Image (cartoon, coloured by chain):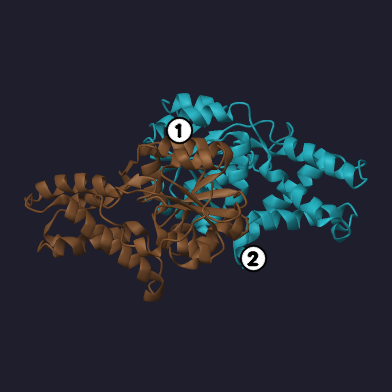
Chain colours: A cyan, B brown
Amino acid sequence: MTARGKPPRKPRVLAFDVFGTVVDWRSSIARDSATFLDRIGRRDIDPAAFADAWRFRYIDVMAAFAASGRGFVTLDVLHREMLDEALRAENIDPSTLDDALLDDWNHAWSRLAPWPDSVAGLTRLKAGFPIVTLTNGNISLMLAMARQAGLPWDALLGAEVTRAYKPDPRAYLGTAEVLAIAPEELCLVAAHHSDLAAARACGLSTAYVDRPDEYGGRPAPDADAAQAWDWTADSLTELATLLGC
Amino acid sequence: MTARGKPPRKPRVLAFDVFGTVVDWRSSIARDSATFLDRIGRRDIDPAAFADAWRFRYIDVMAAFAASGRGFVTLDVLHREMLDEALRAENIDPSTLDDALLDDWNHAWSRLAPWPDSVAGLTRLKAGFPIVTLTNGNISLMLAMARQAGLPWDALLGAEVTRAYKPDPRAYLGTAEVLAIAPEELCLVAAHHSDLAAARACGLSTAYVDRPDEYGGRPAPDADAAQAWDWTADSLTELATLLGC
C-alpha cells in the first residue's frame, strides 16, 4: 500500500499541486498557443515547443523567486512576463502586439484541461477528505479553471494566500497554518518529485501521482529527485482507492 | 425587480456575507452553548442570551478593528477572546475551565446550520455566477462549515485573504482585486445593511437578503442603515430567481 515500511497516518487534509498533477498544461497551452501564433502570423513556430519554453521559464522563476528578493506578485503577472520573454526569444516584440490578445493568451493557463481521471478522482477523494489546492497559481486563475474544468475544490490555497511560491517552505507551512493543522496532518499530492521533496522537508506527508505524459513522454526535469513517497499512484482514482475513498 | 430606477448591471461574481446571511448563528450558538453551559454547571444562564452577548462583542470588535492598530489575527483567535470575556461577564473565570472544552465551544462557529433556503439557493446561483465568501470568518472555520453544511463555495475569501476585517474598505476592495475584477463587477450579498453600505461605498453592487429571524425576531442593530439596495430578496432562492438562475 505504501512505499515505506510502516503505513503513514492518514492525513487530515489533502492539498494538491495543480499544473501537471490535476491538469495537463502542455497539450492545452500548445493548443491555445497554436491559435495565437496563427493570429500573429507565426505558424512556423512549433506550438508544443513554445509551450515547453514558457513552462521551463516558469520552473526557473519559481525556483529562484524567494532568493530574488522581489515582493509578491501573482502568477498571472509572472506568466505574462514569461510570455513576453518567450516571444522575444522567437524575435517577436510583444510591444507591437495587441495587449488584449496577449492577455487572452496569458489566460490560457486558466483553460487547462484536466487529466481524464482528475474530476472522478477528486470527487471520490472529497468524500473522505477536505481537498484544497496548494498551487503557485493565483486565486482568480484557479477559480476560472475550476469552474471550466469542474474541479470540486473545498478551498483555493497556495502562493497567493501564503505570499510565498513553492518550493519556499513558507508556502507549505503557511498552508498548514491557514488550515489550522500541523504540517504532518497535511498531505501534498503532486506529480513532481521536487515539490514533494520540499513538502517532506517541511514535515508534510506525500502522495506521488505519476503523469508520464506531462512532458510529452520525455523524462521530467526533476526525475532525479525521486524518493520513496508515502503513497504512489498512477491516477487520482487509484489514490482514492489507496486512501479508502 | 430592483429597488432603484434602472436595473443594475449583472455582476460577474457574487460574494456572500456568511454569519446571519447564509447560516443561522443565533440558534446554533445557543444550542451548542446550552450543552457547554450544562457541562460547566451553569444551566442557569440563558443560552440564547449568551449567544447574543458573544455576537454583540463580535460586532463591536469588527467595527473597531482597523482603528485599533492591532495586527491581523484570525477570527478563531478573536472569537475565543470574546468567549472568555462573555464568560467573565457571567462571573466565570475561563482559566479554571478545560482548554479543550473552550476550544470546542469556540468552534461552535464552524457548526452553524444554514437557513433552509441556503443550500438550494447557492446551488442555483452557482450555475450562473462564481459564488465566493466575503466573510470575516477565517479559512479553516469556513472550510469546516462548508463541508458540514454542504455550502458549495467556489472560493473562500474575505478577511484572512485581504488581512482586513469588514467594514474596512480593504476587505471589499481587496476581494475584488484577488478576483481580478473591478469593484463594480462584484456584488455583495448580505442580510446586514451596515455591511452593504460599506460595500456600496467601495463601488460594489449590493443584494439584500432579509433574515427576520437572525436576532430571534427582534430588530437588527443596524436597521437604521437601510438603503434602497440593487436587489432585495427574502431568500437565496428568490435571489436566484431575480438574477435569472
Does residue B129 appear to the left or right of A129 in the view shown? right
| A218 sits to left or right of B140 | right
Q: Residue at x 79, y 53 (%)?
A: A100
Tag nearer the camera, 1 or 2: 1
Q: Is residue A137 visible?
A: no
Q: How far across and how far down the image is residue A13, in percent?
A: 42, 40
If you read the primary sequence from the N terminus, does the residue marked by circle 1 or circle 2 appear first?
Answer: 2
Q: Position of residue B223 (x, y in %)?
A: 35, 61
Q: Nearer the viewer, residue A135 or A34?
A: A34
Q: Which residue is most to the front? A: B5
Residue B57, picture quadrant? bottom left
Between A239 and B80, the residue placed more toward the observer is: B80
Look at label 1 and name its amino acid: Lys
Provide the secondary structure element on which disc 2 rests.
helix
Q: Report how far apart the C-alphas of labels 1 and 2 lie in the structure.
A: 37 Å
Tell which of A13 and B217 is nearer to you. B217
Identified at 14% across, 65% down, the residue is B89
Vertical position of residue A224 compared to residue A4: above or below: below
Q: Is residue B123 above or below residue B143?
A: above
**Amino acid type, label 2:** Ser
Coordinates of residue A189 in the picture (x, y in percent): 52, 38
From the viewer's side, name the closer residue of A193 and B190: B190
Task: Write the residue at 38% across / 54% down.
Answer: B137
Tell me the subunit letter for badge 2.
A
Q: Residue at x 80, y 38 (%)?
A: A48
Q: Quadrant of residue B88?
A: bottom left
> Which residue does the numbered mark 1 point to in the structure image?
A126
Q: Chain of mark 1?
A: A
The residue that label 2 is drawn on is A68
Q: Are marks 1 and 2 on the same chain?
A: yes
Q: Is residue B159 left or right of residue B84?
A: right
Callout 2: 10 Å neighbours few (<14), some, many (20+)?
A: few
